Amino acid sequence: MTSAPSLAEALKGRLIVSCQAPPGDPMRHTDTLVRMTLAARSGGAAAVRVNDPEVVAATVAAVGLPVIGLWKDGDSGVFITPTVRHALALVEAGAAVVAADATARPRPDGSTFAELVEAVHAAGALVMADVSTFDEGVAAAGQGADLIGTTLSGYVPGSPVQTAPDLALVADLAAALATPVIAEGRIATPEQASRALAAGAHSVVVGTAITAPTALTRVFVEGLTP
């Protein structure tokens, strides 16, 4: 099992690249996503974040970096690693860290985030809590999460809707918690990533700005439209 202190040390001040593609996107192919993780490694990423046990297993075999695995099942409510079953499948696939929704919303099987943390720890992996508010981050740390990510801020009712990273949430959590805080969500430039670290983030996750050619092409096309 990767220890939380050793992983935290490996990630401190560094970039994690989220290598994912939405359903229907041409990039949503296991070999393509693995190659994306290899490109991220070549560029200097400290770790990668990938979706689906199959992609996790293929990435673990190929990339030689810590893999943060998640399993998106559905598209509403709690759908990022929603149950203990999903979490343990990611551990079985080789994820060093399981990322899971740790918001206050009910989980589809009636379980709790604390139960998921306990099961993942017992299986030998760590947990990254994806939260949307300060209270959720504090609660997740109290329930044993090894990393706290601001991933869901702006995407869950009750969290601030904005186009930029929620650096206020990063700063508040970093000031309140001993658990490392990972800035994630709408980080579009190196300058924003640097500001996240300055706000107290332990590490920064960037996805779309690096690994989403379909979305980035759409931005340019829209920018050229009169």
Image: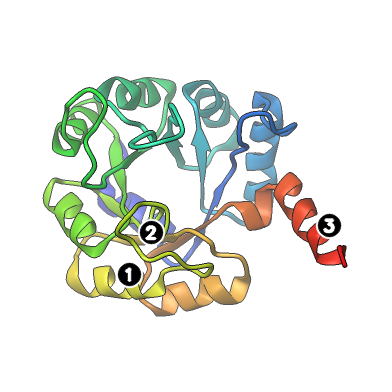
Inspect the image, locate mark 2, and give the three-letter code of the amino acid beneath it: Ser
Image coordinates for residue 58, horizontal then vertical, percent: 57, 24
Residue depicted at x 58% and y 52%: 207
Q: Crowdedness of circle 2 by 10 Å Cα count: few (<14), some, many (20+)?
A: many
Residue depicted at x 51% and y 23%: 57
Element on which disc 2 rests: loop
158 versus 75 height, above or below: below
Tags 3 and 1 in contact by the CB under 8 Å rule?
A: no
Image coordinates for residue 95, horizontal then vertical, percent: 41, 32
Instruction: Report which residue position mark 2 lands on.
Output: 153
Q: How far separated are the C-alphas under marks 3 and 1? A: 32 Å
Q: Crowdedness of circle 1 by 10 Å Cα count: few (<14), some, many (20+)?
A: many
Q: Tell us which disc is closer to us: 3 or 1.
A: 3
Picture quarter containing residue 9? bottom left
Residue depicted at x 15% and y 31%: 115
Element on which disc 1 rests: helix
Q: For the N terminus, give its image quadrant.
A: top left
Element on which disc 3 rests: helix
212 versus 50 height, above or below: below
Instruction: Give the label on residue 25, or none.
Output: none
Instruction: Report which residue position mark 1 lands on.
Output: 169
Inspect the image, locate mark 1, and give the three-letter code of the amino acid beneath it: Leu
Q: Tell us which disc is closer to us: 3 or 2.
A: 3
The residue at the far front in this view is 226
Inspect the image, locate mark 3, and give the three-letter code of the amino acid beneath it: Val
Residue depicted at x 49% and y 63%: 14
Tags 2 and 1 in contact by the CB under 8 Å rule?
A: yes
Image coordinates for residue 76, horizontal then vertical, percent: 41, 36
